Image (cartoon, grey):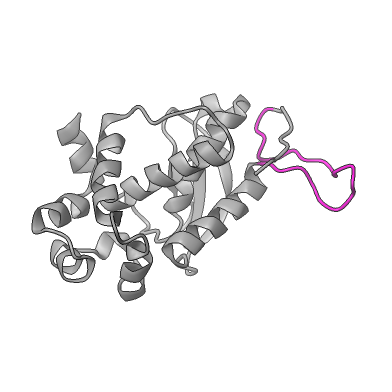
Amino acid sequence: MSIELLPLPAIGFATELLPTRDGYRFTLTSLLSTMLSDAEQLFGPRDITYTPVGIEFSGDRPQIWYPGTNKHVSIILTDDAREDPAQAIFQLAHEVMHLLSPTGMANAPVVEEGLSALFQERANETYGLNLRIVSKPYIEATKFTNQLLRGQSQIIKQLRKIEPSFHKWTPRFLVGEGNISIELAQQLCEPFMEFETRIK
């Protein structure tokens, strides 16, 4: 996929009309739309009771957060990504996955973080970013998630038809519906914050 990005700081907010006058140059905002559509096609529809409201830059760790009490979700990318389009796209791809089943709090399981990292790797190839995941916990989460996906590429979409929220998946549910071992199911359902502490 070929896209044109303006080399401006905070690229999520500046665009211009294409020379063909039939659209605008891609920014993080329009890529958010594209990526979210791709994520839904691959892994099932998002929870529409939550509304994505935009992209912000702050700190040194990308994340989503919930401004106010009205089920709005904002994506925060790092300060370093503010003037680095490749890094911003790479981070955005990861956070987009968390828009499928937001919870209002930080309690994603390993399987959700693994899928987010895999989606991030997909964006790396799609947009030619030449970046890679270096965090050991995320690398390990992708390994476990790939074991779930092995030989059953549609399994996430199938599981989410039964239970759309990743954080509600249990080992018993994954064993029964996902055709995997109890050991793998337990690893996939572990809260990522605990997993991250343990793996580091």
The vertical placement of 155 against 90, above or below, is below
Horizontal and vertical percent position of residue 57: 55, 34
Q: Quick one: quadrant of the C terminus?
A: top left
Q: Residue furthest bottom?
A: 162
Q: Residue at x 27, y 30 (%)?
A: 136
Horizontal and vertical percent position of residue 60: 43, 27
Q: Quick one: 67 or 122, which is closer to the camera?
A: 122
Camera sees residue 80: yes
Q: Residue at x 55, y 31 (%)?
A: 129
Give the prevailing secondary structure in the magenta stretch: loop
Q: Is residue 168 left or right of residue 181?
A: right
Q: Quick one: quadrant of the N terminus?
A: top right
Q: Residue furthest front?
A: 151
Camera sees residue 70: no
Residue 17 in magenta stretch: yes
Q: Is residue 6 left or right of residue 136?
A: right
Residues shaded magenta: 9-27
Q: Quick one: 184 or 110, which is closer to the camera?
A: 184
The quadrant in which residue 56 appears is: top right
